[in-house]
Amino acid sequence: MEVIPAIDLLNGQCVRLYQGDYNQSEVFHEDPVVMAKQWADQGATRLHLVDLDGAKQGESVNLAVIEKIVKAIPIPVQVGGGLRDRKGVAQLLKLGVQRAILGTVAVEKPELVQDLAQEFPRQIIVGIDARQGKVATRGWLETSEVEASDLAQQMEKFGVGGIIYTDIHRDGTLIGPNIEALRELTNYVKIPVIASGGVSCLRDLLSLLALEAIGVTGVIVGRALYTGDVNLTEAILAVGNGRLQDVPLNLDTSTFA
């Protein structure tokens, strides 16, 4: 299972929100490029970037910072936030970003996602951010009536490369991922699912590892890395490449079966 560190960009800084609330943001580093290099040096195989300003404004805002990050690290970068049209997606991919993450347009303009998935094969993934099973849009400021499972099935038919599933009520809270919701989502789709939101410790990662066989191929970790509750190198050793390896953990992993 791939452990993917997250960098959320707001006003050019590296921040974390609590439950997606822009009024509850905490700055963890003033220079996101430094953080990106740190995660790459610690063994990350991919970096997850979210342009929070872009998500709120409906267009990419932190392109200059994103470009610097892409050029500064040797690992693939995936980016979401504010991608609402073909121009924005193409511009981002031209910078060297490997994957573009679409959220709001998957609900509001699903035909655009279908077109982009065909034009940029394997480079388009959809972020499904849910509140009690309903998909949130526009930087989590609005909640639609669309069910997460229904949207996931539609996006799979359109040929997207995967789904990032975020439980908004758990994001930034360190209360653990929504295992039940992830398990249910994998019943509806066969494309890869990446878990996001709530990871607080290695035990949480091990609980997600138990879902790898049913399609949860990665996990995005944010706040827990910045607070030190999760050590990235140790996490990669624990669950990286789908293997439980020898790390100093005193855990009964049979409880996660």
Image (spheres, rainbow, N blue to C red):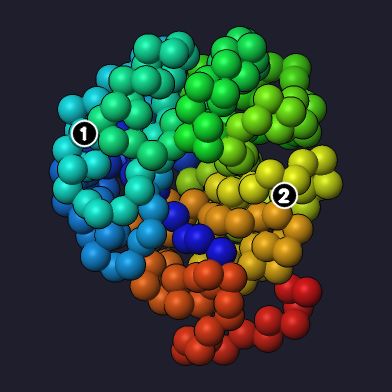
Seen from the viewer's position, the closer of residues 19 and 165 is 165
Image point (79%, 27%), residue name: 150
Give percent across and percent down for residue 43: 33, 67
Image point (47%, 40%), residue name: 18
Image point (50%, 70%), residue name: 240
Tell me how far mark 1 sits from mark 2, CA to CA: 32 Å
Give percent across and percent down for residue 234: 41, 76
The answer to whether residue 14 is left or right of residue 214 is: left
Quadrant of the image occupied by residue 132:
top right
Figure disc tally: 2
Q: Amino acid at mark 2?
A: Leu
Q: Amino acid at mark 1?
A: Glu
Quadrant of the image occupied by residue 251:
bottom right
Q: Quadrant of the C terminus?
A: bottom right
Q: Which mark is residue 67?
A: 1
Give percent across and percent down for residue 37: 21, 55
Which numbered mark, 1 or 2, is in the foreground of this view? Answer: 1
Seen from the viewer's position, the closer of residues 30 and 70 is 70
Q: Which mark is residue 96?
A: none
Q: Quadrant of the N terminus?
A: bottom right
The residue singled out by tag 2 in the image is 182
Vertical comparison of 117 with 187: above or below: above
Image point (72%, 49%), residue name: 182
Q: Earlier in the sequence, mark 1 or mark 2?
A: 1
